[in-house]
């Protein structure tokens, strides 16, 4: 028996059935509204997802203040600040990509998407450098962890500094995983843009990936002060 | 009654009265709803296939009434339950201290005078007993149904709770928090004895070294005395007499020194810094066992002469008085440790 | 009642629209996905049920003489994990929610049909990972994974199981998200929020909990896995971690999770009570509001699982009062369902039997929940069989009975066939009797002091345990009978009319079974929900 699904709705459409319209939606605006609502709800779930670790961090920071302060001062503030700037710029290029796709500017869309990917790549590269440094200084928690020395007093930090690094790696690691997924989504968008998928009538995927990308940026904007800035001894 | 365990502690009776009240409410509403539902189903059974039901309009007043009445009832339950809970969680001042170490899959009990027991706890009737408990591995839970007593023993902290036995007898002790393979074997007995029998039991056995005395040895072993030895210009504050006193910290806050504070000061000394002292104490986390921490705590407690109003009283039948000097000689001649 | 249908086997419907395994495994039709969930949850329910049977066999005698201790510990863990994560959480949303929500609101499908299929695959992958772990030696931590036992001491497949639950958790999140967006944006013209069936209100409230709560268990299990793999120490006291922090994070989800399990059941009951009283439900607005209130309040009470674990006395007081508050909306629902029967035209078909059973057992079980919210009492019964009895009254006496009632009610719509009424009534009674005999003695033995998760126990508890095991065997038989006759009915059952119950609701205005696109044209809705009396009066006037 032929699959009758796709056709029942079509005969009711006034315009030519737009290719982007999924059959179970009445029209494109309804589809866009539903997709956008879904992405916002998904971002709420991500807040709760990261929230568990933020909770653990806040609890342990207040229990082991000196250990965490001391360990936090061992993070590379320069690299962290550069990364923050890089991510904020990538949100700019992302926003521009959303604008360009909605204005029908195919070349600009692809350029801005590439720019976002490059900036994301820089972020991930810098993170890789930081992780390598930690590995070299034996600051990775686990059997090879060596209690680091306090920057100022050169005395060993309290043992619970290992907890700081556990949370550091888990939180920035999960964030980096989200960035990698974001880079994948951006690549997919470039492919779609090349195939003329976006127009003033339809740029929802770019819009929604933009929301996701901005969210990942916002997570970093919370991580950075919590991990790098609080209790900083010197600039 | 066959569905209640013996009421063998001072608060068991209160718990059971609360339970009976809640059973009454449960029974009342269950029977009410059950009866109404069955009655309506029978009374309004469909008699003909095209029968029409009667319109019953929404009634906001009824909704409010059957919201407010249950609300009032639960507030009563909450209030009564909280009162019993306060009774359970507030130990009286003159409790006997007993220390418990939980470990997969046994209960190691130590009385302050050195009596050690394994999976058994002897207590006198008519005197409050406060258990300070530590776990050497995973979470356990000390549960004596006849006393309605239960407290989780969480590794990484001291857990304290109290009871007072009112009836001599032999009562089940269960571990009530799943702790691994032999969780169901981590059981034993609590023996509540008349004061005379308890006295006999105490003097009958051969207690080992008292907790405080073992703690004194650890104090030296871990070189605590090099900073806390009361010598002139000592780098650390004196510990003599601090138990039960208010301690002032460098950030302006203060706290009464209890067992939890002592334990925290050993494993996480940077958490609260005593005012006027540099933050140089190293952490001993992972270097001292839970039992060792109990011993050190008992020792530091013993440096306070029985302060009023806390659970540190060491008087009682058969318990040796705590030594007052920082590094005491053993207060009793060495005797064979009681084998568990 | 509708007229007898034309030769149903000739008509195209969602079941015969396409044949072949690919048409099922790559379907995006919400109705087919519902059946895929039905197969999945039934399989994992059977697994969890076998584990339960073995537990009850061991508990026939006080000695641990059937299984070794470690095996028994793996059995109760398997039972809990399978039942909670792979049957109860996905069950009613995956099967009835998926099938009914688009039909009830007059839509062609859910908002994101491909995401819906992905949800099913995530569920199956997660469940199969946990199943793999069971087959290869199992996990012995209990479904609660308390640390540091689960992260440091246990020797089982903790990481594999935790990751399996993590993956299935995303199934739950995406299902909830799909339902929320569907209900927000795809209701037919004229279907305002206040005209929506209460089943949809219940699923909406469930969706709120699914998207807000599940991510927290997801990150918690991820941290447990990371701790186990990389020796991190976040929850390990030997490295400065706090086992009670784990409990807070775990129960922050797992308490709302029990409302993910009960809200859909209550949603079903609202439909059954009104349909079989043939009368508008009493207090529609209050039931709808109660569903949302339960969803919100459910996030505020998690600490009542931790009264004994060392949180402060004041935390205990706060969680106690809030736990009492969350019971009130449930009570409101029970009173409204009871009032719906009043002056109704009550017909004793099987779905109603399940609904009445639910009302009685849920009321009783819920009231025992108040006992647990009572601080002074919970200390004694925490971690005993009293708790086990309480939650089984709600989950089995409540949710499973509602699930079965719903399956029976909508079976004609789902399959186009009628199940045998005699056997369905027999099994409803067998389940009711078996259930009570299994779990009521557990309240008694729990208060007497028998701890949970024990495979050996003092002799004085034996009689009550034997009663419980006897009940369990009866209950097991009760569950097998519907499995048999539902499958039988798909081949030999009488063909169902479009609306065999004479119920209101857009789902009953489609053929049984419905065509793939649900409605040939989008319906328009007017008039109030559960419009039994007005329509009937109108029909009577027309003659």
Image (cartoon, coloured by chain):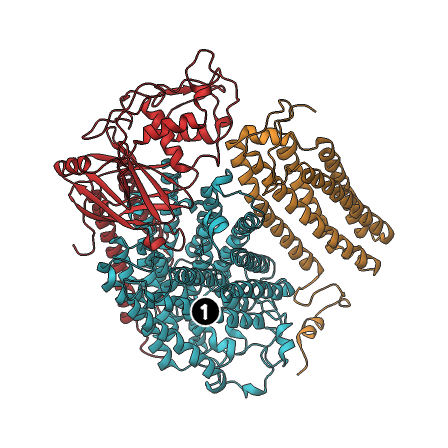
Chain colours: A orange, B red, C cyan
* Residue pictured at 70% horizontal, 74% vertical: A7
- Viewport quadrant of the C terminus of chain C: bottom left
Q: Name the side, left or right, on which A207 lies relative to B101.
A: right
- Viewport quadrant of the N terminus of chain C: bottom left
Q: Name the side, left or right, on which B146 lies relative to C7.
A: left
- Residue located farthest toward the top when viewing the structure as drawn: B232
Q: Position of residue C468 (x, y in %)?
A: 29, 66
Q: Position of residue C70 (x, y in %)?
A: 41, 60
Q: Name the side, left or right, on which B17 lies relative to C84.
A: left
- Residue located farthest toward the right when viewing the structure as drawn: A107
Q: Identify the image quadrant of residue A139.
A: top right
Q: Nearer the viewer, residue C245 or B242?
A: B242
Image vertical order of residue C408 relative to residue C159, above or below: below
Q: Which residue is mark 1?
A: C47
* Residue pictured at 35% horizontal, 73% vertical: C428
Q: Nearer the viewer, residue B332 or B3?
A: B332
Q: Dot 1: what SS?
A: helix
Residue C180 visible here: no
Mark 1 chain = C
Residue C531 visible here: yes
User: Is disc 1 surrounded by few (<14), some (14 to 19) or many (20+) residues within 10 Å?
Assistant: some
Q: Name the side, left or right, on which C165 lies relative to C464.
A: right
Q: Position of residue C216 (x, y in %)?
A: 53, 49
């Amino acid at each position: 028996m032929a699959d009758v699904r796709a056709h029942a709705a079509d005969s009711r459409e006034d315009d030519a059935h737009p290719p982007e319209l999924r059959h179970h939606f009445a029209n494109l605006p309804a589809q866009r509204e539903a997709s956008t609502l879904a992405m916002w709800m998904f971002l709420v779930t991500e807040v709760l997802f990261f929230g568990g670790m933020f909770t653990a961090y806040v609890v342990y920071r207040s229990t082991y203040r000196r250990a965490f302060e001391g360990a936090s001062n061992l993070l590379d503030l320069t690299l962290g600040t550069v990364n923050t700037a890089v991510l904020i710029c990538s949100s700019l290029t992302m926003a521009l990509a959303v604008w360009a796709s909605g204005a029908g500017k195919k070349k600009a869309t692809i350029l801005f998407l590439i720019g976002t990917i490059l900036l994301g790549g820089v972020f991930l590269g810098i993170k890789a450098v930081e992780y390598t440094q930690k590995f070299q200084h034996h600051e990775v928690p686990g059997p090879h962890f060596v209690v680091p020395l306090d920057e100022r007093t050169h005395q060993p930090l309290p043992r619970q500094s290992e907890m700081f690094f556990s949370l550091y790696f888990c939180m920035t690691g999960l964030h980096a995983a989200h960035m990698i997924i974001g880079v994948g989504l951006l690549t997919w968008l470039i492919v779609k843009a090349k195939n003329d998928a976006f127009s003033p009538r339809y740029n929802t995927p770019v819009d929604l990936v933009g929301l996701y990308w901005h969210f990942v940026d916002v997570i970093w904007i919370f991580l950075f002060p919590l991990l790098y800035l609080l209790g900083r001894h010197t600039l | 009654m066959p569905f209640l365990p013996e009421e063998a502690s001072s608060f068991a009776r209160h718990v059971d009265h609360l339970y009976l009240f809640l059973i009454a409410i449960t029974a009342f509403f269950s029977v009410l709803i059950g009866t109404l539902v069955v009655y309506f189903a029978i009374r309004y059974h469909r008699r003909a296939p095209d029968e029409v039901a009667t319109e019953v309009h929404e009634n906001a007043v009824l909704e409010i009434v059957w919201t407010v009445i249950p609300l009032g009832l639960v507030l009563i339950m909450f209030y009564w339950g909280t009162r019993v809970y306060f009774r359970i969680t507030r130990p009286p001042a003159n409790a006997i201290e007993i220390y418990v170490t939980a470990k997969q899959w046994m209960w190691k009990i130590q009385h302050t005078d050195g009596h050690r027991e394994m999976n058994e706890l002897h207590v006198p009737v008519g005197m409050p007993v406060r258990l300070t408990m530590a776990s050497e591995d995973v979470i356990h839970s000390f549960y004596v149904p006849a006393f309605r007593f239960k407290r989780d023993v969480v590794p990484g902290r001291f857990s304290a709770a109290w009871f007072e036995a009112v009836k001599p007898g032999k009562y089940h002790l269960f571990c009530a928090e799943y702790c691994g393979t032999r969780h169901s074997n981590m059981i034993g007995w609590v023996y509540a004895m008349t004061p005379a029998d308890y006295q006999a039991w105490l003097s009958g056995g051969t207690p080992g070294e008292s907790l405080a005395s073992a703690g004194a040895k650890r104090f030296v072993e871990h070189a605590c005395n090099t900073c806390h030895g009361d010598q002139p210009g000592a780098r650390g504050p004196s510990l003599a007499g601090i138990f039960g006193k208010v301690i002032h910290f460098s950030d302006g806050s203060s706290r009464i020194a209890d067992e939890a504070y002592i334990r925290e000061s050993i494993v996480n000394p940077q958490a609260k810094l005593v005012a006027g002292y540099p933050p140089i104490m190293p952490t001993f986390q992972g270097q001292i066992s839970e039992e060792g921490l109990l011993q050190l705590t008992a020792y530091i407690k013993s440096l306070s002469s029985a302060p009023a109003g806390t659970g540190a009283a060491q008087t009682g039948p058969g318990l040796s008085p705590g030594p007052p000097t920082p590094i005491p000689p053993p207060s009793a001649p060495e005797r064979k440790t009681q084998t568990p | 009642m509708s007229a007898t249908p034309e030769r149903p086997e000739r008509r195209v419907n969602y079941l015969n629209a396409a044949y072949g395994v690919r048409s099922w495994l790559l379907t995006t039709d919400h109705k087919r996905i519902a059946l895929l969930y039905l197969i999945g949850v039934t399989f994992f329910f059977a697994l969890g049920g076998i584990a339960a049977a073995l537990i009850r066999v061991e508990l026939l005698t006080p000695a641990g003489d059937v299984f070794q201790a470690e095996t028994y510990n793996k059995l109760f863990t398997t039972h809990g994990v399978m039942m909670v994560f792979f049957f109860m959480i996905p069950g009613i949303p995956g099967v009835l929610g998926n099938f009914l929500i688009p039909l009830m609101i007059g839509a062609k499908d859910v908002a994101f049909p491909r995401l819906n299929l992905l949800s099913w695959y995530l569920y199956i992958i997660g469940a199969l990972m946990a199943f793999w772990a069971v087959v290869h030696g199992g996990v012995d931590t209990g479904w609660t994974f308390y640390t540091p036992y689960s992260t440091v001491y246990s020797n089982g497949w903790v990481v594999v199981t935790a990751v399996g639950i993590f993956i299935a958790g995303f199934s739950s999140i995406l299902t909830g998200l799909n339902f929320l967006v569907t209900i927000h944006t795809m209701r037919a013209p004229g279907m305002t929020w206040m005209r929506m069936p209460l089943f949809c209100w219940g699923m909406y409230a469930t969706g709120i909990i699914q998207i807000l709560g599940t991510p927290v268990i997801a990150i918690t299990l991820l941290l447990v896995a990371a701790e186990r793999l990389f020796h991190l120490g976040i929850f390990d006291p030997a490295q400065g971690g706090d086992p009670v922090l784990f409990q807070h994070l775990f129960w922050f989800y797992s308490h709302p999770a029990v409302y993910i399990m009960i809200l859909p059941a209550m949603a079903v009951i609202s439909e059954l009570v009104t349909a079989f009283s043939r009368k508008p439900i009493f207090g529609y607005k209050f039931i709808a509001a109660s569903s949302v209130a339960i969803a919100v309040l459910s996030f505020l009470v998690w600490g009542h699982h931790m009264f004994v674990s060392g949180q402060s006395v004041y935390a205990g007081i706060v969680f106690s009062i809030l736990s009492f508050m969350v019971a009130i909306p449930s009570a409101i629902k029970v009173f409204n369902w009871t009032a719906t029967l009043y002056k109704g035209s009550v017909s004793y078909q099987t779905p109603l039997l399940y609904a009445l059973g639910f009302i009685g057992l849920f009321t009783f079980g819920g009231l025992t929940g108040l006992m647990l919210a009572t601080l002074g009492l919970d200390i004694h019964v925490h971690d005993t069989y009293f708790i086990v009895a309480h939650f089984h009254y709600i989950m089995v006496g409540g949710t499973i009975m509602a699930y079965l009632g719903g399956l029976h009610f909508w079976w004609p719509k789902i399959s186009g066939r009628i199940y045998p009424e005699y056997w369905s009534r027999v099994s409803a009674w067998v389940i009711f009797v078996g259930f009570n005999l299994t779990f009521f003695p557990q309240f008694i033995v729990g208060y007497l002091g028998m701890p949970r998760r024990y495979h050996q126990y003092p002799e004085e508890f034996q009689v009550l345990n034997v009663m419980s095991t006897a009940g369990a065997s009866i209950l097991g038989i009760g569950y097998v009978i519907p499995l048999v006759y539902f499958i039988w009915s798909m081949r030999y059952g009488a063909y169902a009319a479009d609306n065999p119950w004479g119920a209101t609701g857009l789902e009953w205005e489609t053929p049984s079974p419905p065509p793939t696109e649900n409605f040939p044209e989008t319906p328009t809705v007017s008039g109030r929900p559960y419009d039994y009396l007005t329509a009937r009066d109108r029909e009577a006037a027309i003659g």
